[in-house]
Image (cartoon, rainbow, N blue to C red):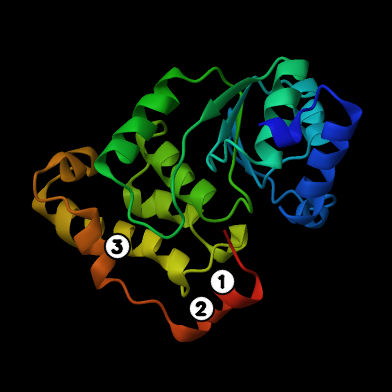
Amino acid sequence: MPQFDLTTPLGRRRAVLDYLWTDHAYLRLGFSNVHWISGELVRTNQPWPFQLKTWADRGIKTVINLRGGKATSFRALEVDACARFGLDLVDFVVASRDVPTREQVLGAKALFETLRYPALMHCKSGADRAGLMAVLYKHFRQGESVAQAASQLSLKYLHVRAGLTGVLDFWVDRYLVEGEPAGLSLEQWVRAPAYDPAAIKAEFRAKWWGTWLTERLIKRE
């Protein structure tokens, strides 16, 4: 990430300014969309470095980045902050407008079994990707039914079901009407040869106003 070389004052300043405006981090200075999923896992929006220090001081040991972004300012600042504050940083990339793949669902199950807790999990807004992963955490680690865990995808967390991000709800609903009645666990359903994320997504239809809200007005990542 040469354009965000944090070893120089100029590089660090450039990274902070890019993070502030390009990543809309100014909106997150006073709003973190923080919700404890359990006593060991909290979901938030993208944290600032000073917020990561606060979390480290509160006992958080691991940060899960759901966004990816290897050549971005937020990534450079997060890598640097986690190293300085003694936090494990784990990248686990998921999408807000795609049906999760078999590998992502099974990978999430394995991830939650091996993390160093307490942990913090974030995407950009803490609404959609964090919501999907919270559903998987609640189901796989805490044993909640998928129907119960689906409450992690709701407007309470700023998730918009009516927009393109509603494909995540559509995926959950598909399991509840297709997999569960057939006696399949979520893991068995996604492991089945018939599991086809692309086909499920192709059947999803967002509402026009929801799409306008997520894609035009708030420009959700």
On residue 173, the disc is: 3
- Who's the residue at 34% across and 54% down the image? 147
Disc 3 residue type?
Asp
Quarter where residue 101 is shown: top left
Q: Is residue 183 above or below residue 116?
A: below
- Are there few (<14), some (14-19), or many (20+) residues within 10 Å of tag 1? some
Secondary structure state at the residue bearing disc 2: helix
Viewer-proximal residue, 71 or 140? 71
* Tag 1 residue: 214
Quarter where residue 143 is shown: top left
- Who's the residue at 70% across and 23% down the image? 82
Residue 5 appears in the picture as rendered: yes
The C terminus lies in quadrant: bottom right
Closer to us: mark 2 or mark 3? 2
* Tag 2 residue: 210
Q: Locate residue 138 relative to residue 72 in the image: left or right.
A: left
Secondary structure state at the residue bearing disc 1: helix
Number of dots carrying numbers: 3
Q: Locate residue 150 relative to residue 215 in the image: left or right.
A: left
Q: Earlier in the sequence, mark 2 or mark 3?
A: 3
Disc 2 residue type?
Gly
- Residue 44 % position (x, y): 65, 44
Q: Earlier in the sequence, mark 3 or mark 1?
A: 3
Q: Locate residue 146 relative to residue 210 in the image: left or right.
A: left
- Are there few (<14), some (14-19), or many (20+) residues within 10 Å of tag 2? some
- Residue 66 % position (x, y): 52, 40
- Who's the residue at 46% across and 40% down the image? 93
